[in-house]
Image (cartoon, helix red, strand yellow):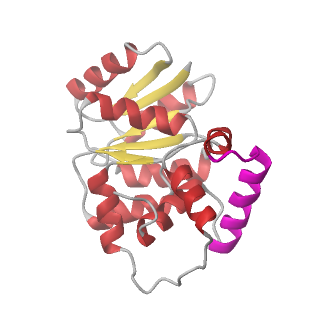
Amino acid sequence: MIDIIIVDDHDLFRMGTTMVLGSQPEYNVVAQAASGEEFFSKLDSLDKEPELALLDIILPDISGVDIARKLRAEHPNIQILMLSAESSEPTILSLTEIGVEGFVSKNAPTDELLTAINTIVNGGTYFAKDIARLIRDVCNSSELHIDLSEREKIIIRLCCEGLRAKDISDQLNISIRTVESHKTNIFTKLGINNNVALVRYAIRRGILQL
């Protein structure tokens, strides 16, 4: 079971999302909160940390961006999926710099929400296509170009699509050890240490097709 906590100040949205997730046997909504203060209070009261937090950006006290930043600093093992109608450039870029695992519009269909959650809890990242395009369009075009092999570009693309090392090894007919070795080399070349940064790079350089 994947434990999930939902943070949104709209009662109907929280209830609807809880019902959707409750229909999936692998997900368990352990708490709901209508504000940042209530979220951290409920988080502290849980016996164990949830695997995933669904966060709205606009809340009555603390913004979702500030909550995400605090979670990264104090609860780095909790994965973060932003669910919001707010998608301004400064907000999206702040969230990608913080390192959230995904962003989906609150207007997205139920299937996309479930796809995003499934991708994230399985070690991937998920940014809706409009958000990914926004990240790409506003990224600094003068960013230093890194020389990557075609095999490394393929592995980057597969990682960004949410595939695990075993899935990539099966698809490319190479060993898991070789996949991990390629990922280590890629991270070293790019000066990064996580898949979220890898997604940002892939979007900037057009490796991830949108």
Q: Does the magenta stretch include residue 5?
A: no
Q: Is residue 99 above or below residue 52?
A: below
Residue visible at 50% across and 17% down?
26
The quadrant of the image that shows the N terminus is top right
What residue sits 24% from the left and 39% below the top?
A: 106
Q: Position of residue 72 (x, y in %)?
A: 56, 51
In the image, 192 versus 8, the foreground residue is 192
Determine if the magenta segment contains residue 181: yes
Give the camera-side residue of 121 and 153.
153
Q: Whole-percent x and y of residue 47? A: 62, 22
Query: Which x, y percent locates residue 162?
Result: 52, 44
From the top left corner, tell me how far across and down residue 205 is, in percent: 44, 72
In the image, residue 37 sits, relative to residue 174, either above or below, namely above
Residue farthest right in this picture? 177
Magenta-colored span: 172-190
Total numbered labels: 0
Q: Identify which residue is drawn at 27% across, 20% down.
A: 15
- Front residue of 66/163: it is 163
Q: Main secondary structure of the magenta part?
A: helix
Residue at coordinates 50% horizontally, 67% vertically from top-left? 201
Quarter residue 20 falls in: top left
In this image, 183 relative to 28: left or right?
right
Q: Is residue 163 left or right of residue 64?
A: right
- Give the left or right position of residue 136, taking residue 174 as reference: left
Q: Is residue 31 left or right of residue 86?
A: right
